[in-house]
Amino acid sequence: MKKIIVTGGCGFIGSNLVKKLLLTKSNIILNIDALKKQSVPDSLNKVIKNKKNYFFKKIDISNFNKLNKLIRDFEPSLIFHLAAESHVDRSIVNPFSFISSNILGTLNIIESIRLNNFWRNNKSFKLIYVSTDEVYGSLKKNQKSFTELNKFYPNSPYSASKASGDLLARAWNKTFNIPIITTNSSNNYGPWQFPEKLIPVVISNCLKGINIPVYGNGTNVRDWLYVEDHIEALIKISKFAKAGSNFNIGGGKEVTNISVVKKICSILDEIEPKKFKYSKLIEFVNDRPGHDFRYSINFNKLKKELNYKPKVEFELGLLKTINWYLSNKKWLLKNNK
């Protein structure tokens, strides 16, 4: 029996992780989520029905007292910390909520662990702190890809708040010996992603027949990682990686934003045709402040130490994602307003 806490378990990545963890019947899952607008609790409706090994608590991790009581009473042997504000555009408009959730919330979790003794007698206890490649900033022209040794150069309030969490996790591991592992992943995509991120926004706007906004000239490059591959990596890391380590998790597929948009339009032209080509909806808009030009993740360490390799090719994953959203149009269009 393994008692596992997942913070942000009603988020896009978190809900996929919860579903995967529940496949192991001996796991007891406590999902902690504040259920904000971007949460997707619907994604868990089918899998948690009549589950005796699943528990949910609606708590904002910035509330230390409530969070501490939960962690103390539950005495987990594993924590996946995914709860976070995660959209760069919103961090520019309202940075305070990102500081509260991503920095104070992370501090509350690691302090709660430090102040309680349950983990000291459990040699297998680990905290997996899930972060982002955006902490590294934008790659320069002569740089090939980010490794775990790259310095942090965050360029947005979001990436600065996540980098702060990375540093807190490292400090509490080094100072207090709390068994923490940090992961930095590239851009995730897949079913149930809330329609504020690029791929679901493009699909939704196509279905609505409205303009698809693309920042600048669309040549910004991202590395794409199918969410199920990310989940597989996180579980493997939780089982086999050493405390105090950190890992990059990538998909190995770099694509410009405009290429992603055009791919989606092309696929929809075939499977959901209209009288016009969807690419005609593309509208280039003013670039956002501090927009990183290129991310590229080097995940050789994960390959070498834990034999990790992403299974889902980007083109196949994108098709699967589009088909899922087409099968869930009502949910997609309701949430993209």
Image: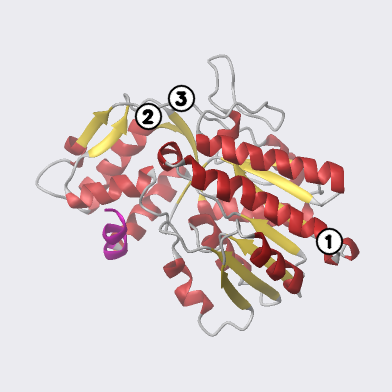
Instruction: Please state if 278 lies on the left or on the right of 69 as rendered.
Output: left
Assess disc 3: are there few (<14), some (14-19) or many (≥20) residues with their C-alpha within 10 Å of its C-alpha: some
Asked if one can make out residue 2 in the rendered structure from this viewpoint, the answer is no
The three-letter amino acid code for the residue at tag 3 is: Phe
Assess disc 1: are there few (<14), some (14-19) or many (≥20) residues with their C-alpha within 10 Å of its C-alpha: few
Instruction: Please state if 258 lies on the left or on the right of 57 as rendered.
Output: left
Disc 2, SS: loop
Disc 1, SS: loop
> Are the residues flagged by discs 2 and 3 in contact, CB closer than 8 Å?
no
The location of residue 19, given as percent across then percent down, is 55, 67
Identify the residue shown where x is 56% and y is 63%: 9
For disc 1, the marked residue is 124
Disc 3, SS: loop
Q: Nearer the viewer, residue 337 or 107?
A: 107
Numbered mark located on residue 293 in the image: 3
Magenta-drawn segment? 329-337
Q: Nearer the viewer, mark 2 or mark 3?
A: 2
The three-letter amino acid code for the residue at tag 2 is: Arg
Spot the residue most to the left.
275
Please say if 50 is above or below 248.
below
Q: Nearer the viewer, residue 296 or 161?
A: 161
> Are the residues flagged by discs 1 and 3 in contact, CB closer than 8 Å?
no
The location of residue 182, given as percent across then percent down, is 70, 45
The location of residue 3, given as percent across then percent down, is 73, 71
Identify the residue shown where x is 59% and y is 22%: 144
Which image quarter is the N terminus in?
A: bottom right
For disc 2, the marked residue is 288
The location of residue 221, given as percent across then percent down, is 45, 29
